[in-house]
Image (cartoon, rainbow, N blue to C red):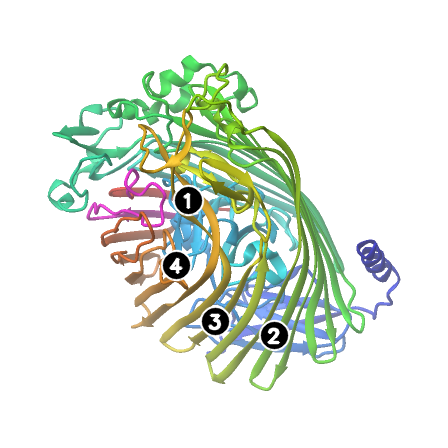
Amino acid sequence: MFKQSLITFAITSAIFSSQASAAQLKGKVLDTNNQPVPNATVHLHGKSQSVKTDINGQFSINVDQDSQLHVSKDNFINERIDVSPDSPYVTVKLAPSSVESVVVYASALHKSNIEMASPVAVLGGDELKNSAKPTLGETLKQLPGINASYFGPVSSSPIIRGLDGPRVKITQNGLDSSDASRVGPDHANTNDSLAAQQIEVLRGPATLLYGSGAIGGVVNVVDNRIPTDVIEGVQGAAEFSHDTNSNTNTVAALFEAGNDGFNFHFDGVTRKGGDYDTPRFALPGEEHEDHEHDHDEHAHDDHDDHEHGEDEHSEETHGETEYAERVANTFIDSEQFNIGTSFVGDHLTVGLSYGRIETDYGIPAHSHEHHDHGDEHDHDDHDHDEHAHDDHDDHDDHSEDEHDHAHGAEEESVFARVKQDRWQALFNYALHNNWIESIQVRAGFTDYEHSEIEHGTVGTTFTNETTELRTNIEHRLGEWHGIIGYHFSDSDYAAEGAEAFTPATNTKTHAFYVLEERRFGDVTLELGARIEDFALSSNFTSGHDEHDEHDHDEHEEHDHEGHEDEHVAEIIDYTLDTTNFSASIGAVYDFAEGQNVAVNLSRSERAPLTAELLSNGLHIATSTYELGLGYHIEGDEIHFEPENIEQERSTNLDISLRRFIGDFGYTVNFFYNDVSNYYYQRNTGYMYTGEHGIELADHHHDGALPVYQFESADAELYGFEFDAHYQIDARNRIKVFGDHLRAELDSGEYLPRIPANKLGTSYRFELEDFSAELSATHYMTQDKLAQSETKTDSYTLLNASFSYDFSLSGVDLVGYVNVDNITDELGFVHSSFIKEQAPLPGRNFKLGIRGYF
């Protein structure tokens, strides 16, 4: 009821609020040398659209009420000035920033990354385009404090300060991506870097705007599928790139047009590639030598001449040890597009968009039995046409013969087929009365399907339908500027098939939040709070035998001991209903010109999600039997007893030091995160087989998998990250970056799969239209191990990139070459569930060309 009243009030205010007569405010943007700054963004608080300065730095914008003008440009320090309809001609001077400065859309208050109280990193422009990978995890992992879960290069999600999965919210234009990547590491997220204008990473809790699922941070992918600025005429871009390691071809296109405030947008990406090559490594087995001891002398020195169809070098057997130079079943075949339209007026902006994704990708180390490794490479990725998604709508009819032809008849490889339809809508009205600046509504609907296909037959299907609504009212109350908002989300998740280790659930949230800021001299104070009603409901069959049909004979009526099975199936109607409260207080102190210190203290709460609470079944991707918090093991029986499920509570302190003026700049973040009731998986000491159920590990049977259960315990995560650079002169720049993380339970045990610390440096050279960069990143040994983990040795990745800007027939072009892992170093990712089976790719050349019109 309150929600309806709020929306009714917003619309009524928009229609009947009295508007002062609009006036054209003219001005000019200059740099500190009094030279014009073209293409700077000029934005009036409360309006969704903005204008750009022309080649002479001049602009004109409508002003109809006292407000604040926000002027920004990448790599300059933002300026804000108060204006009114009768303001005279204004001149704005922008000082250059030595730290990359970009407006962060996820901040909701038009702040740049160097102005926010909480740490944030932004990747955009040509840097994003040149470094874009098929997944967000691989695209972002070079940033300090960011790593990747790495289930192969085509299924890799971001890890922020050691937190991933349900603790990291992945959004697109502020709305949840709504895929199944939070359920398991083998599920790829559905955001593509090439379609993005920029990708924003909010480190630490960002729960105020984005909900309890953002207790570890937010990755927000910003695109222009609903244009919010006036587009005049026609503009666009196109790109082609080729990766030599996996023989991957990528084509991307962008087209936009506009007339008289009406805009149209289209973007599309196709990507097709095969299994990737690695330096020579030992396949895991019961008896083999440490794969890291002698990889240098066995390194594969010439991946460029290695043809994917030549099977004789892909794997070798020496005694009891098998070696490989390729990770099988890591192909990708993806197509996606987005279309959108909008009307941008002086006060009103409305728009609608639709996006479609169809992707096939291989899931490495994913099989139901130990098949013949010699056949793994028979999945010739250059010929993926046989099983590509030429007809995704008919995937249920794929024949077993077709998949056998593609993957090898003796191999039970599994690949995923992902489909997603995504609608988004935007409404923004700028009121500019005495206290309300604007009312914005964003809404989205996502229909997601992820099918795992074995021998051409759908084995398991995960679906997720999500409806989301976010309403923000931006206001100014005296000296305070902020937003109040309402956030609604309704997600219907289901899983059917042999690997449906989580039951179907409905998750619904209603939340109200407020975020306010005020300037006190050189200090900007930020206050925020969110209250969220969280309800998770599920109707499922209790008892572990419901998952055994994949391994049991259907006629089996007695358990493995021969006595009558006493585990009677029970239908359970379960609901978890909690209220999550989050709050934060932060301040930014500009203690000197171009320097500040930011402190942010936040407390966040979240309830367990489906996988953490209700898992009960085989998870083949991780080679485990998983149990949720709601289950209890007694002897060899599993009981559903979800009593005393407590929320996970995080108290996080961030301290950031920044220098962003002059030739020397840096950002250093220190953080300490104290988490009560941290949800994590622990080895129970039990083993599981379909024939014998669960038994203690000393009753070992062939093919038995360990039973891991989610538990909760207090934990601490703390460390630092830094990024510093020195501009030697106009052509040369050096940079140093790194991070350090320690994550452990209060008992002194280390948390599982915590990423290794890294330290890196880069050198950049620019000469007119040519630029080159050489970087080296050292990943340190990870020997802070959780139960059942093994040490991961250190490795160093040496990369280089070259680009050249030129014009041809009036079209601006950029040609680039990236060389990844120049030395062909063998590296294993400690945060990966399959680190032994899937090392990082070997040497790769990426050649690309991009054109703008």
Q: Position of residue 499 (x, y in %)?
A: 48, 30
Q: State which quadrant residue 584 falls in.
A: bottom right
Q: Which one is in front, 221 or 367?
A: 367
Mostly what secondary structure, the magenta segment?
Answer: loop
Residue at 21% x, 33% y is: 324
Q: Which residue is mark 2?
A: 526
- Choose the circle earlier in sequence order: 4 or 1: 4
Q: Which residue is mark 4?
A: 143
Q: Is residue 839 left or right of residue 137?
A: left
Q: CA distance from mark 1 to mark 3?
A: 27 Å
User: SS of the residue at dot 3?
Assistant: strand
Q: CA distance from mark 3 to mark 2?
A: 14 Å
Q: Which residue is at the front of the view, 586 or 26?
A: 586
Number of numbered callouts drawn: 4
Q: What amino acid is at disc 4? A: Leu
User: Magenta segment: does it hold 603?
Assistant: no
Q: CA distance from mark 3 to mark 4?
A: 17 Å
Residue extending farthest right? 16
In the displayed structure image, the side of residue 282 where residue 152 appears, left or right:
right
